[in-house]
Image (cartoon, grey):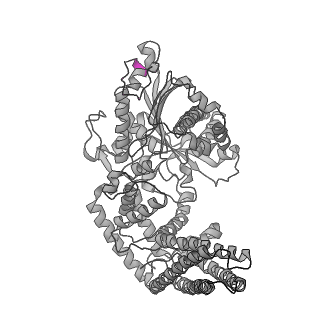
Amino acid sequence: MPRVSSVLTFALYVLFPRRCTVVLFVYERAHQGLESHCPVGNAALTWLFGTFLCFFLCTCLEGLILRHALKGTILQPAKRRHVCTFLYLHFIVTIADISFTILGTFLDYHIGNSCYVRNHVHTAIEVVIVGNYFIIACNFLGVALIFNVFAHLPSEEKWNRLFSFLEMCLCMSKSRERAREKEGSLSHIAICFGEVFQGADLVPSDIAAGLVLLALQHRRILESETLGCSAEEGENSGEKGHVDESKHISVELGNLLEEGAHYARWALASYGWMLYTWANPRGGLAMAFSGEGPCTCCTWHTQQIFRGEHRPTENLDKAALMTCAGIRAEDLYYVSFTNGIGEQPYFIARDVARRAIVLSVRGTMSVQDCITDSMYKPVLLNANAIEMPHLSGPQLHCHAGVVTATNFILSDLDRHGILSTIFFGDTIKTHESALSKSAPDHLEGSEDEHKNWTLVLCGHSLGAGIATVLALHLRKVFQNIRVWGIEPPGGLLSAELAAACREWMVSITHGCDIITRLSGPCLLKLRRDLVDALVRCKVNKFSLLTRMTCVPDSVEESDLLLEPGCEAHEATLLRRDFEQFHIKQINERPLMAAPLYPPGRLLHLRRISPVNKEMSAASIRDTYEVRWISAQELMFQGLLVNETFFTDHFPDKVVAVLSELAQKYQRR
């Protein structure tokens, strides 16, 4: 049974009478404005009358659809059983409307201005024709997104059709191999959605309504539940110490946050010019329209190594990278722009002030990166390769997409021998034309001095996960290693591997960031909570979305949700069927529910009061508190839905908050 989005239907119900009024006016003007001797005048008037009749019938049908769509709650489709009949009738009228629109286009092409007394009448008719095409296209798009038009197909195939439609709208090309296999670029993401929402029979509008209800429920959790302990008390301390000890902890925390902000900027730098412009529009546009950035970048080839195909924005990316990281041209050793499924861009540069060589991996920014993200089911790491032979089986679980991208960077580093050349002065390996003729400078000094330089790996989002697994492989060669993970994926490593990273890694999560809390078990928990919220909802979608949009702060759970056990019988049966499917799916696909965790020591930037768009730096310092939390308690709490759970993941926001908090604690 298709479910109607009441919001869209209401909008159409309001707009179509006005559309009919416009057409009626145009009809009257056209009738008065036609020349008496026009050879196709009757055909033109027939088109106008037929178009008006179609609009009138559509308006009546949409009013009936609206009336029946508002019956019952979200998961009571039986009360809306007549909607199907009206939809089929609406489809027939739409076909007639398309036919009349094609006829009008044909007549307009042949008539032109020859049959009209006034030119403005002809212009009005052209506006009606073009507008009608637009409205028909919107109708089909709305039906594709709002109704379950592929209800007869399996869940994975249904989502694959939807993403294929999206792929067509985005004009994304298919490779020959994918075309031969009938798989588009987004097919991997479609499979992921199909697995997660399989068995729930939910359309996008249902999911949106469920997330709104979860945001209402999670509001209470955010106000009452606090994870971990305050960083001002020390990571392993539950009680406050003496004044001197508290001051010492505060200074250490300030230094830690300052270092985190520093390498968060390096992680932001790996995104290149596009994200730099997002974070700093004035600086990014100035860089694009000035000749200094691109010209400077063209003079680097004497000592730098660049890889990948030349792109129009390559010079801008390099200039933005250096500006964001605060480095000079001679400090940048290597840049890889290669980007594909399991192939992530990264760069290697020298941080002279901190005596570190930094490898920064870019996070998710392209469709290929999203596909890598969607490969969430874990695979086994090689215990010998990471020098952890005591681990076996599920203890070696790691995000499959991250492992693929890590192997790509490892092979790239091994092929060119870049890190070994920089640290130890070994002969660099060459590979076709990927390298310049001159090798990067190795660190000068004795072998003992080399040990004082640190290999720092950093990244944001997907890049943080790749940096972590890279460190697991590289630490056997580079003993002095450190990793900064800025909002890494939650479903990254097994509990044992995540704990092993604590010695040399710090991960930072900001607010209710969705990615750091995202894993297979958390997605399944979100799905169950979402279905439960829809079952308990006691209003229709139109009422729900209207109230949460207009007066969200005044809405309480009791206004929209029934008490457990008071649900309608039909909705209860749907939940029971879903619970049975949920258990069966986990038994058949256990890797979906494999527990994975974010790596290292977790530093949570917890928001303790709402953030305003025009908030000053001083206000930001008072808006957040810093807490040490464990990966287990973070993943147990799961995904928390609120108005900022997506924007909290933006790297420029994390950089700003870390910088202000670092100043706050360093001044104490």
Q: Is residue 167 magenta?
A: no
- Residue 447 locus on image (x, y percent): 41, 14
Q: Nearer the viewer, residue 259 or 165?
A: 165
- How far across and down, in percent of the image, does residue 474 sit? 36, 30
- In this view, 118 is above or below 607: below
Q: Observer-nearest residue: 453 or 243?
A: 453
Span shown in magenta: 422-442
As drawn, is 457 to the left or to the right of 281?
A: left
Left or right, 60 with respect to 452, comes to right
Of residues 626 and 151, the one drawn nearer to the viewer in this rendering? 151
User: Is the residue 202 above or below the residue 184 in the image?
Assistant: below
Dominant SS in magenta: loop
Q: Quadrant of residue 550?
A: bottom right
The quadrant of the rendering that contains the C terminus is top right
Q: Quadrant of the N terminus?
A: bottom left
Task: Please tell me which residue is depicted at 56% across the width and 34% down the height of the picture.
Answer: 262
Q: Quarter-wise, where is residue 520 in the image?
A: bottom left
Asked whether residue 38 is in view, the answer is yes
Residue 437 included in the magenta stretch of the image: yes
In the image, residue 649 lies at what x, y percent?
Answer: 53, 49
Q: Position of residue 56 (x, y in %)?
A: 59, 86
Instruction: Specify the quadrant of the image occupied by residue 150.
Output: bottom left
Count of labels in the image: 0
Q: Is residue 11 left or right of residue 75?
A: right
- Evaluate whether residue 258 shows in this view: no
